[in-house]
Amino acid sequence: MNPNPQTETFRGQELEVAAQAYIDLLKRILTRFIGQEEFAEIFYHKRSWQEKVFAPIKAVLNTKGYVMCKRVPFDPAARTVGIDWPPGAETMVGLRRLDNIEHCVKSVIADGVPGDLVETGVWRGGSCILMRAILKAYGVSDRIVWLAESFEGLPTSTHADDLLLRPPIFRACASQISRGLSEAS
Ligand SMILES: C[S@@+](CC[C@H](N)C(=O)[O-])C[C@H]1O[C@@H](n2cnc3c(N)ncnc32)[C@H](O)[C@@H]1O
């Protein structure tokens, strides 16, 4: 049976709408753009009064399997541009930068630019999860998404004024990355 061009076009449009809805929803999930208060593990500046007060309590709580957290109110403006540290999200880059990744991946597909995709410094892998999801949504199976990660978080600052402890939230975890990738594909 010959395909009806009008029906095929309609199906193509429906698929495009479904693909875009999936990508838009995924971006909100990966950034936890869900409007809810979250909880983040407490960290503090070296030699601060908070370190003196919290460190011993934290040490005891940790031995009992508890984690000391603080409330993190949801700030849509900050999460949009990626200037907060989302405690539970797979990416910290925010919605607008994910839009940019989406634009770049779609451009290389549409323009037939050859090659694989890579992110260097993936943290929890959310940006790569999005890249893989876009490739899948558009039926692209001949490109690999490569992930590079030190698993050491941010390098220790050598700046005299920078007393911030390296926050644990920055430490990437291989099992968290692979869980995220397998759940999204
Ligand atoms: C700001 S986070 C990246 C955020 C990530 N792109 C996202 O979508 O949320 C920086 C990441 O780079 C990693 N990193 C820092 N120095 C690195 C290096 N020399 N090589 C590879 N990864 C590095 C850190 O461990 C951390 O996971």
Image (cartoon, rainbow, N blue to C red):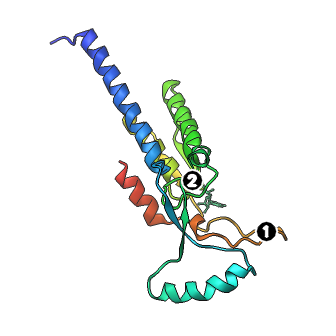
Mark 2 CB within 8 Å of ligand 1: yes
Identity of the residue drawn at 35% across and 48% down: 185
> Secondary structure beneath disc 2?
loop
Give the residue type that dot 1 points to: Asp
Frontmost residue, 55 versus 120: 55
In terms of sequence position, does the residue under pointer 1 or pointer 2 come before the other?
A: 2
- Counting from the top left corner in percent of width and height, residue 132 is at 44, 44
**Which residue is labeled 2 in the image?**
92
Q: Quadrant of the N terminus?
A: top left
Q: Are marks 1 and 2 in contact (CB under 8 Å)?
A: no
From the viewer's perspective, tell me whether residue 151 is left or right of residue 158.
Answer: left
Circle 1: is it few (<14), some (14-19), or many (20+) Cα within 10 Å?
few
Frontmost residue, 61 versus 104: 61
Identity of the residue drawn at 62% across and 84% down: 55
> Outermost residue, left direction?
1
Frontmost residue, 157 versus 169: 169
Give the residue type that dot 2 points to: Met
3D distance between C-alphas at marks 1 and 2? 21 Å
From the viewer's perspective, tell me whether residue 46 is left or right of residue 85.
Answer: right
Frontmost residue, 111 versus 160: 160
Vertical arrangement, residue 123 with respect to residue 58, above or below? above
Q: Quadrant of ligand 1?
A: bottom right
Residue 101 visible in the snapshot: yes
Residue 68, labelled with which disc? none
> Outermost residue, right direction?
160
**Which residue is labeled 1 in the image?**
162
Vertical arrangement, residue 62 with respect to residue 23, above or below? below
